[in-house]
Image (tube, rainbow, N blue to C red):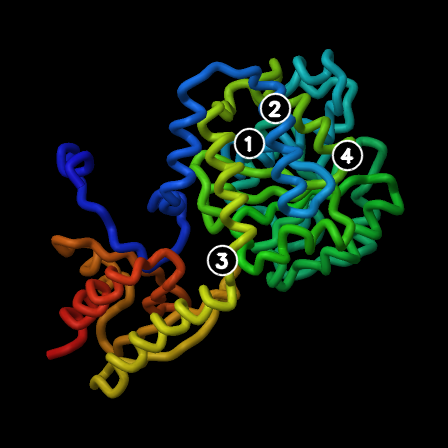
Amino acid sequence: MSLYADLGLRPVINARGTLTVLGGSVMDPAVLQAMTEASTAFVDLVLLQRRAGERIAGLLGVEAACITSGAAAGLTIATAALMAGDRIDAIRALPDTTGLRDQVVVLKSHRILYDQAVLLAGARFVEVGVTSAATPEQVAAAITDRTAGLFFVEEASTMRGSLPLGELITLAHDRGVPVLVDAAAELPPADNVRHYLDLGADLVVFSGGKEIGGPQSSGLIVGREPYVGHCHANSFPQHGIGRGMKTDKETIAGLVKAVELWVGRDYDLIFEQWNAVVDTVLERFAGIPELTVERGFPTEPGIQPTVIPRAYLTHATRPAADLQTALLDRDQPVAVGIENGRLAVNPQCLKPDEVPILITALQELFVP
């Protein structure tokens, strides 16, 4: 690709997944066409945001939706909405939270690198329990008249110190407190779009630039009115904490088209294709001395989506980190993950014509 070559960069074969640092995902030509079309005219962005949210909500079968400039921006805007609602004075004062409920209850085990996005709105975390343990009673005691919401991170749901989301939602709602769920990379399964809302969550944040296949700088808040309406009030292009988190007309159009395409995907077929890639790796590298190959699924917190099969490769004497670096240092770089000390090949982002390149790269490492 001449653009990357001009910058001295080499495109990467992505056998790691929809990571932000690798560019999220590759957009369908129809998404690019929608973005190009949107760029050719002026439009009322406030109305575009609202109508696009309504369109996406209808496609996904949820009550309401708000497009954001990525999932992290979605967390900031959703938090602002829980604190300031649609009060103009409060919206324009953030991150100054004087006079507002500004505490967000979170399990200690759910503190992650991305939760700075919650603090950016001006909120303060009230941590519950320790990393390895927490009780419903501790959560209940943490909720006060200063509590704006309860924050739940799906990628941390398997941590020892976590509690079931449904139980936390009931506990919070009994005390009049809404629940915000970070599910940025929790697709597939496709049912997760509604799963957290069916459990009773009030706002759920997804990335638009991962499995959905929209622009990388897009995100999506889905949930209940009036909370989503309050998200719109705190989001671009309104003047508030979300003003600098721009969702331009091209990004909005691209995400709408991406959602239209995504809801029509045949995940039975897609999983067959992913499993076939894993089978190819296992068959090619089985029986090689000092190399263990196995099929599996992620078990470490923060590795998503956990439902996508992986091929895991472990060498008896060569550390996984050294192998990962060697793959990236090739003339045609190949990105793979590391999980539990093993190389992890994720088929999610591999194109059919890239699988032979992946196999060749692994052969160079493991086949004498």
Q: Earlier in the sequence, mark 4 or mark 1?
A: 1
Give the vertical position of 181 relative to 55 (above or below): below
Residue 127 visible somewhere in the drawing: no
Q: Label 1: few (<14), some or many (≥20) within 10 Å?
A: many
Give the vertical position of 159 relative to 4 (above or below): below
Q: Which residue is mark 4?
A: 225
| Labelled pair 1, 2 in contact (Cβ < 8 Å) | yes
Q: Label 4: few (<14), some or many (≥20) within 10 Å?
A: some
Tell me, for residue 235, which label it has, or none.
Answer: 2
Tell me, for residue 304, which label it has, or none.
Answer: 3
Q: Earlier in the sequence, mark 2 or mark 3?
A: 2
Marks 2, 3: nearer the viewer: 2
Query: Does residue 321 appear to the left or right of 157 in the view shown?
Result: left
Tell me, for residue 351, which label it has, or none.
Answer: none
| Labelled pair 4, 1 in contact (Cβ < 8 Å) | no
Going by the numbered disc 4, the residue's amino acid type is Glu
**Residue 35 x/y as whole percent:** 42, 30
**Foreground residue among 168 and 278:** 278
Q: For residue 82, what is the image quadrant? A: top right
Going by the numbered disc 1, the residue's amino acid type is Thr
**Foreground residue among 268 and 149:** 268
Query: Does residue 349 appear to the left or right of 297 in the view shown?
Result: left
> Is label 1 in a helix, a strand or a loop?
strand
CA distance separating discs 3 and 1:
21 Å
Q: For residue 311, what is the image quadrant? A: bottom left
Marks 3, 1: nearer the viewer: 1
Residue shown at 27% from the left, 84% from the top: 286
Query: Does residue 167 appear to the left or right of 80 in the view shown?
Result: right
Residue shown at 81% from the left, 40% from the top: 177
